[in-house]
Image (cartoon, rainbow, N blue to C red):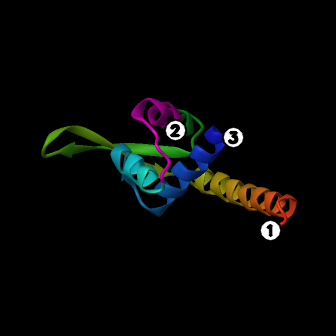
Amino acid sequence: MRKGVLEYCILSIINEKEVYASDIIQKLKEAKLIVVEGTLYPLLTRLKNDVLLSYRWEESKSGPPRKYYEITESGINFLKDLDRGWNELVEAVNKIAGKG
């Protein structure tokens, strides 16, 4: 379940704007979802291989080039599906828990 939630969160972050991996980690930390690079990079690679993300390299003034991620059209459609699924799950859990 956590993997699916992380995909949803990562795609949601990248949907806002093109981002560098450390930006993703920072946003997840701010939301109290602690994710290490060893978890993030394989997910990003899988999402890219599934054509949900693309990336570009940008030269950095303070180190090696950086890889910036952007959501693809397929990624946007997949994110919409995840959003619907998440909302259905929240609604079902709330009903069971007596909160809805």
- Residue sitting farthest toward the bottom: 100
Q: Decide: few, some or many residues near mark 3? Use Cα within 10 Å; few <14, some 14-19, many ≥20.
A: few
Residue beneath disc 3: 1
Instruction: Name the amino acid, label 3.
Output: Met
Tell me residue 79's x, y (percent): 63, 55
Q: Is residue 4 left or right of residue 93?
A: left
Residue beneath disc 2: 48
Residues under numbered marks 2 and 1 in contact, where contact means CB atoms less than 8 Å apart: no
Quarter of the image where one finds residue 17:
bottom left
Q: Dot 2: what SS? A: helix
Quarter holding the C terminus? Answer: bottom right
- Residue sitting farthest toward the left: 61
Magenta residues? 32-45
How far is mark 2 from mark 1, CA to CA? 37 Å
How far is mark 2 from mark 3, CA to CA? 20 Å
- First-in-chain label (3 vs 1): 3
For image coordinates 80% across by 63% down, the residue present is 94
Tell me residue 85's x, y (percent): 75, 55
The label number, if any, that marks residue 99 in the structure image: 1
